[in-house]
């Protein structure tokens, strides 16, 4: 991605030839300095490649998390719709059980009182 914006590659620096003038720079110093620049370029390119890979991995993870979130929202929506459409919950079962107990105990008390009266 960024490699299109970089003018020089390490190989370009390595292969660069300068014209020699009578009062020019010392070739050994220029070569040493260019070697340092080449090393830096290689490090920059490696860092850029690693960051691009990390970015791609993070984008993939974001997409997966967004999909999980959509699925979770859908599951919650389905669950809330099914409960509101007459689905029996634990609370409904407890109420029915309580009503049945009241009916059984009240009829038992009624039968006992009828037996005492007779």
Image: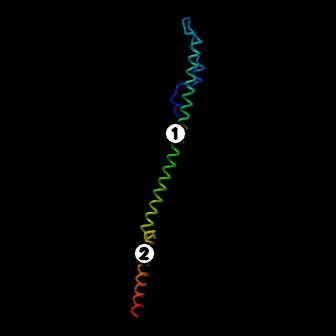
Q: Is residue 86 above or below residue 118?
A: above
Name the residue tied to disc 2.
98
Q: Which mark is residue 69?
A: none
Outermost residue on the top side: it is 22
From the viewer's side, name the closer residue of 61 and 38.
61
Q: Position of residue 64 (x, y in %)?
A: 52, 49
Quadrant of the frame with the C terminus = bottom left
> At x 44% / y 67%, what residue is drawn?
83
Q: Residue 108 appears at what percent x and percent y? A: 43, 84
Q: Residue furthest bottom?
A: 118
**Residue lying at 55% horizontally and 35% vertically, measured from the top left:** 50
Q: Nearer the viewer, residue 46 or 22?
A: 46
Check contact, mark 1 vs mark 2: CB within 8 A.
Answer: no
Q: Secondary structure at mark 2?
A: helix
Q: Earlier in the sequence, mark 1 or mark 2?
A: 1
Residue at which label 1 appears: 55
* 7 to the left or right of 92: right
Q: Is residue 30 above or below residue 23?
A: below
Q: Nearer the viewer, residue 16 or 111?
A: 111
Q: Residue at x 40, y 90 (%)?
A: 116
The local secondary structure at tag 1 comes to helix
Left of 39 or right of it: where is 94? left
In this rendering, position of residue 97 left or right of residue 19: left
- The residue carrying pointer 2 sits among few (fewer than 14), some (14 to 19) or many (20 or more) residues within 10 Å by Cα, namely few
Residue 80 placement: quadrant = bottom left
């Amino acid at each position: 991605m960024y490699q299109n914006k970089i003018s020089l590659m390490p190989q370009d620096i390595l292969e660069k030839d300068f014209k020699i003038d009578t009062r020019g720079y010392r070739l050994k110093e220029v070569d040493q300095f260019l070697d340092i620049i080449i090393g830096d370029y290689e490090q920059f390119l490696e860092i850029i490649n690693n960051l691009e890979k990390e970015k791609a991995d993070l984008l993939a993870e974001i997409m997966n998390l967004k999909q999980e979130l959509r699925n979770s929202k859908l599951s919650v929506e389905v669950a809330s719709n099914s409960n509101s459409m007459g689905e029996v919950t634990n609370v409904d079962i407890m109420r029915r059980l309580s009503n049945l107990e009241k009916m059984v105990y009240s009829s038992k008390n009624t039968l006992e009182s009828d037996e005492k009266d007779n």
